[in-house]
Image (tube, rainbow, N blue to C red):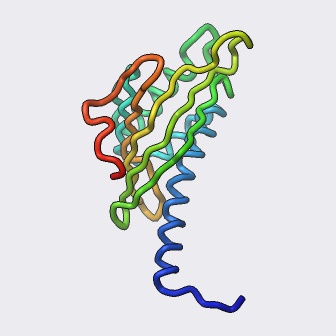
Amino acid sequence: MSEQLSAEELGRLRKLLEIEEIRQLGVLYSQYLDHDYLEQLVELFAEDATCEFGPYGVWKGRKTIYENYVEVERSSGDNPGPKPFQAMHASVNHWVELTGPDTAVGRRYLLDLLTNRAAEEHPFIWLAVYDEAYRKIDGAWKIQRSSLQFLWPQKHVTGDFPGKFPG
């Protein structure tokens, strides 16, 4: 096949590559969180990022985001310390829309399961939606804002959720 791509096709391909880079943030987010690689996890966020995490509060700035992940993931429960794969954060249906050359918005569903429950116990902790904004900084996409809209078993949503969709 020696067929050349048209300018329009090249533009669409570039757009798909940008979207895939952003989707990889969601994949790495879940992998790093579930492996307990919190140092790598926070590098996915912009330095001035904001996390709005319902019952867990609002976290501003990478340092605060890291400290709060340590508190939630390593300091809670009967067994403090790293707990790789004590939970699995299945992040699915990641929709991304580029809003500018260095900005984008997206949504992905969270299926949050505990792996240390007995077989007869329900493994789900939360069903939620990540409502996010992304920014390209020095050639790399970062999470600028992550607003986690909790839908089950308790509802914790921001006043503007679900908002206009798609973006």
Residue 103, image x, y percentages: 36, 59
Q: Looking at the picture, tell me which residue is in the foreground, 116 or 3.
A: 3
Left or right: 141 in relation to 32 = left
Q: Where, quadrant-wise, is the N terminus in this rendering? A: bottom right
In this view, the residue farthest toward the top is: 78
User: Residue sitting at 30 percent across and 30 percent down?
Assistant: 158
Left or right: 42 in relation to 61 = right
Residue 124, image x, y percentages: 59, 21
Q: Quadrant of residue 74?
A: top right
User: Residue sitting at 47 percent across and 51 percent down?
Assistant: 95
In this view, the residue farthest toward the front is: 165
Residue 91, image x, y percentages: 56, 39
User: Residue sitting at 49 percent across and 21 percent down?
Assistant: 71
Residue 55, image x, y percentages: 38, 20
Left or right: 139 in relation to 158 = right
Q: Looking at the picture, tell me which residue is in the foreground, 82 or 119.
A: 119
